[in-house]
Image (tube, grey):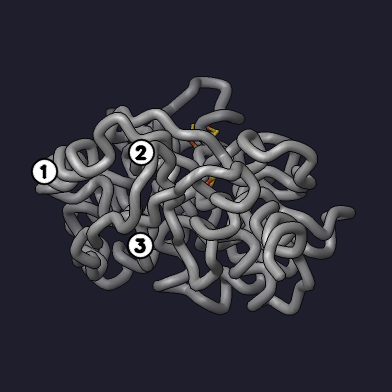
Amino acid sequence: MSFTTCALCPRLCRSACPVATGSGREAAVPAVIAGTMLDAERGNVPAALAREALTLCTDCGACQEHCHLHVPLPQLLREARAERVPRPALEPLQPIHGTGDWIAIESDDRPFAEALSKALGKDVRKWRTSDHLGVETLAYPGFEERLERIRGRIGNGRVVVVSGGVARVLEKAGVGYQWLHEVVRDLPGGDGSCALGGNRPLACCGAAGPLAAFHPDDAERTGRVWLDRSEEWVVRDARCRSHLNRCGGTVQDPLDALIARVMP
Ligand code: SF4
Ligand code: SF4
């Protein structure tokens, strides 16, 4: 499969793409990105312009979902990024601290493991990651070894997550997990995310994929469109929470609700 079908497509998935919609940029329309990449493959586009096009994406999958031909454009873009965009920095896997069957994967500075332990009345181990277990390098060579190490560290632990990035890595590793709002009853659900599914005002808020690192202004514009469209002030994915608050929103996620409930 190549970029040809998308490059010749009359932009049918344009309105589904959160980056095209949120940034308002013609260059971010999936068919235009594919056209740029087709030209790049023919040697007609400089490498920097190809990288620019490839990173105008949150890897949300919406184009494929809305495609009448089900073209796997997100996968084509992922593979092309692994070839043409330098690998993002990768944090070494941190040790898991504590005892007990449960493992809370902390992806920001909030005391997730402690709050979950109080809510469940059980010991909860803490696993800290500042890059969502390296989700942005998932398609790059060598990630399989990291997945093997992740499987080894988790073993038979019962994993609970709040980050869509972490969830994507665990899925790739074939490791079972639950979202916080599935484990603790009566937490608010709120808008879904590109990793979690569910109802959302845009396919992605702009937090995921290479967009935020390479095009922070476009990521912020996308976040503001989400905020304009949303009638919710709760989002399920901690990545969306951080990003939307950076975009001027005042949103919370289930972990905020849990901390407010159980922490002194
Ligand atoms: S994913 Fe489908 S709808 Fe979108 S540009 Fe490609 S062919 Fe067209
Ligand atoms: S994966 Fe999402 S952000 Fe990327 S081109 Fe498709 S719809 Fe746009």
* Callout 2 crowding tier (Cα within 10 Å): few <14, some 14–19, many ≥20: many
Q: How many marks are shown on the rendered structure?
A: 3
Asked where in the image residue 136 lies, by quadrant, the reply is bottom left
Choose the circle earlier in sequence order: 1 or 3: 3
What residue would you read off at disc 1?
A: 145
CB of mark 3 near ligand 2 (< 8 Å): no
Residue 158 lies, in percent from the top left, at: 41, 34
| Residue placed most toward the observer, 44 or 253 | 253
What residue would you read off at disc 3?
A: 129
Residue 214 lies, in percent from the top left, at: 40, 73
What residue would you read off at disc 2?
A: 170
| Residue placed most toward the observer, 164 or 55 | 164
Say which amino acid is labelled 3. Thr
Choose the circle earlier in sequence order: 3 or 2: 3
Which residue in the rendered view is the most extreme toward the right? Answer: 231
Quarter that holds the C terminus: bottom right
Q: Residue at x 68, y 45 (%)?
A: 15
* Callout 3 crowding tier (Cα within 10 Å): few <14, some 14–19, many ≥20: some
Q: Secondary structure at mark 1?
A: helix
Q: Residue at x 42, y 52 (%)?
A: 105
State how far apart marks 2 and 1 are (Cα): 13 Å
State how far apart marks 3 and 2 are (Cα): 13 Å
Say which amino acid is labelled 1. Glu
Residue 176 lies, in percent from the top left, at: 40, 29
Choose the circle earlier in sequence order: 2 or 1: 1
| Residue placed most toward the observer, 99 or 149 | 99
CB of mark 1 near ligand 2 (< 8 Å): no
